[in-house]
Amino acid sequence: MSIETTATDEATVLTQLAGMLQELLEEYGLDDAEITMDTTFHDDLELESVDLVALSGQLREHYGERVNFATFIAERDLEEIIALTVGELVRYIVASLRAAA
């Protein structure tokens, strides 16, 4: 089994997600940004909604249908989306992967 199918711990998922975010940030010259569980998508990384759509595509490519970013976002109101942290998404991914295992 590959790491993508067995990664169900937060540290591994954080590393994978940080890599995906670094790819997105390269477009803005911010690829050296430190990404932790407390990093916010909006304030710290300055990602816009179009960037979240791109991230959704990366998550789908990496994890398949087991991680549904659209559902994750749909369950939140605008303030929650603006305040969303990397850690919240990591915990969602871990829970989704464990549920699908």
Image (cartoon, grey):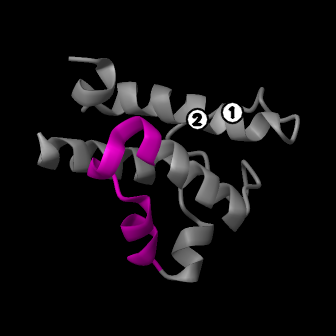
Tell me how many marks there are.
Answer: 2
- Magenta highlight range: 60-76
Q: Residue at x 60, y 45 (%)?
A: 39
Residue for badge 2? 20
The 10 Å Cα crowd at callout 2, few under 14, some 14 to 19, many 20 or more, is some
The quadrant the C terminus occupies is top left
Residue for badge 1? 23
Distance, label 2 to label 1, CA atoms, is 5 Å
Above or below, 76 against 88 in this view is: below
* Image location (x, y in percent) of residue 28: 86, 42
* Image location (x, y in percent) of residue 59: 46, 45
* Image location (x, y in percent) of residue 42: 69, 60
Mark 2 in CB contact with mark 1 (< 8 angstroms)? yes
Above or below, 34 against 60 in this view is: above
Q: Is residue 90 left or right of residue 98?
A: right
Q: Is residue 11 left or right of residue 18?
A: left
Please identify the quarter of the rendering in which residue 97 is found. top left
Residue type, numbered disc 1: Glu
Residue type, numbered disc 2: Met
Q: Residue at x 35, y 39 (%)?
A: 63
Residue 74 falls inside the magenta stretch: yes
Q: Is residue 46 left or right of residue 83?
A: right
